[in-house]
Amino acid sequence: MTKLKTGLSGPPSYKEKYLVVDDVKRVKVGQIIEGGALEQGFKSYITRLDAIEKEGKTDECIMIGTIEYVLEDESALPSVDSSLDGLYDIMKAVADYVIKNHTTN
């Protein structure tokens, strides 16, 4: 079970099934299977993170985050904005960690 850090939006816990983890293509796709967005009115919630290498830059990349979702009903629509904010917060935390801990050989 993944626990969200205090201060990040969203419910306190969820279970995620990884559909794709590809270190070569730098892609991670996960589907929430319990808790989280499913408790906020989403019928389905899948995130995809892509790290695209910048041409000629071995120590830089572009991060792209995609969320595919199906709402149980329209009353959950306000949750969409907060889930986008949550994905951004996660991507920012990863970027900050990599910048702080990255060493070149």
Image: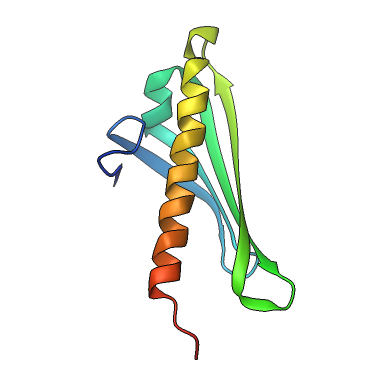
Tell me which colouring the rendered structure shows: rainbow
The total number of labels drawn is 0
Task: Give the residue furthest to the left.
Answer: 6
Q: Is residue 72 above or below residue 53?
A: above
Residue 47, quarter of the rendered image: top right
Residue 42 lies, in percent from the top left, at: 49, 21
Give whichever of 89, 14 is nearer the camera: 89
Name the spot of residue 87 as percent of width and height, x first: 48, 41
Which residue is rendered at x = 34% and y = 36% of the image? 14
Residue 92: image x %, image y %? 46, 52
Quarter of the rendering containing residue 59: bottom right
Residue placed furthest toward the bottom: 105
Q: Position of residue 80 (x, y in %)?
A: 52, 24
Quarter of the image containing the N terminus?
top left
Left or right of 11? Residue 16 is right
- In the image, taking residue 37 as reference, residue 44 lies left or right, namely right
Which residue shows up at 43% across the image and 48% down it? 90
Q: Is residue 72 above or below residue 81?
A: above
The residue sitting at 58% across, 22% down in the picture is 70
Against 81, residue 19 (above or below) is below
Relative depth, front residue between 55 and 65: 55
Q: Toward which corner of the image does residue 3 lie, by quadrant?
A: top left
